[in-house]
Amino acid sequence: MLKKPGEGENTIGDSMNRELHRIVKTMRVLQGCDISCYDEPFLSASLEKRMAATSLATVTDYCDYLSGNADEAEQFFRSLNITYSEFFRNPLTFAVLEQQVLPRLIEEKQDSCTAELRVWSAGCAAGQESYSVAILLDELLVARKSSLSFRIFATDISGDSLVTAGRGVYDTVAVQNVRLKHLQSCFETGHGSYTVSRRLIDRIEFSSYDLLDERSTSPPGSIYGDFDLVFCSNLLFYYKPEVRQFIINKVCHSLSYGGYMVTGEAERGIVDTINLEEIFPMSAVYRKIKECQVMV
Ligand SMILES: C[S@@+](CC[C@H](N)C(=O)[O-])C[C@H]1O[C@@H](n2cnc3c(N)ncnc32)[C@H](O)[C@@H]1O
């Protein structure tokens, strides 16, 4: 670990803890945002990356550089929003969805004569997660000759990601986890790009929604929530514990009774199973078994 010059045993971690508060204050002034919602180890790691990018050796030097520097504040803020995603990310979780959860939901919906199956991809990034579930639902419904309809509400705070998601155009690397039969049935190909079929794009409503918004419990476009399935994957671990719990409670609240929540497999330890039960060992799929309180 780097040492602060002239400070003997002091590590970068020591100075970070002292200076993080200063950075939080600076970011509030320069960016009008509260970055104290993020997990401290994640903030420290992001700070180290910005120090490396700006060639500043000490945390104090970086804090001085950041003060009054709106461009660097913007760069730092952007570095905190990780938008990496993949089609069919977490294969075990998607196998559980394909083989157990989605068939069960389809049967339940058909038996109850409900008009549609409702899915929310909360933190959809560039759309890979929403299109993955759309591909599976489309295939399962066609195989069953079912007239059941589905709607996916896909939301994010990243405007750039939402634009990419809405276009539904991906390169060869992005679609490497997609099965050949799905590439053939759900994409149009041309000039090294893969465009999601219109019939799937039309099932998805992409919109901006901040999961930390305290005034609402679900995206306004969905009107009343009541989702059968919500993805809240690979975003919880960036936030500090109380913020993660706020998000989980919000998502759980937006689920219909017996509905399912999906997190990232790396986030399994974060979900407490008071209101949710794990569906399959090691997968990150949970079923709502009790109502959740959300403070809004
Ligand atoms: C690492 S990506 C994961 C994308 C996808 N869910 C997956 O599992 O591959 C996290 C996404 O969550 C979004 N995000 C982070 N905080 C958010 C918040 N407070 N409200 C809505 N979206 C958020 C980010 O913009 C980013 O697109």
Image (tube, rainbow, N blue to C red):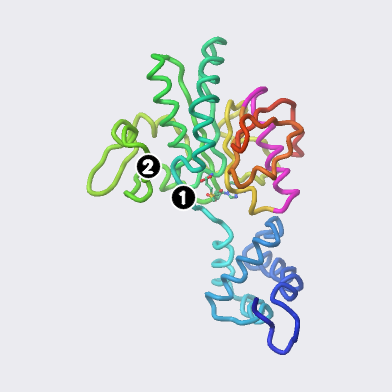
Estimate how packed mark 1 is, as few (under 14), some (14 to 19) or many (20 or more) residues with alpha carbons within 10 Å. Answer: some
As shown in the figure, which amino acid type bears the numbered disc 2?
Gly
Q: Is residue 283 magenta?
A: no
Answer yes or no: disc 1 within 8 Å of ligand 1: yes
Residue at 41% of width from left, 31% of height from top? 135
Residue at 47% of width from left, 33% of height from top? 133
**Circle 2 SS class:** loop
Residue at 66% of width from left, 67% of height from top? 44
Q: Could you say where residue 291 lies in the image, as x and y percent from the top left? A: 74, 27
Q: Residue furthest bottom?
A: 6
N-terminal of the pair, mark 2 or mark 1, is 1
Examine the rendered structure and indicate whether residue 167 appears above or below residue 292: below
- Does the magenta stretch mainly form a helix, a strand or a loop? helix
Quadrant of image for the C terminus: top right
The numbered disc on residue 161 is: 1
Estimate how packed mark 2 is, as few (under 14), some (14 to 19) or many (20 or more) residues with alpha carbons within 10 Å. Answer: many
The numbered disc on residue 168 is: 2
As shown in the figure, which amino acid type bears the numbered disc 1?
Ser
**Circle 1 SS class:** helix
In the image, the segment drawn in magenta is 240-259
Q: Nearer the viewer, residue 225 or 145?
A: 145
Q: Is residue 254 magenta?
A: yes
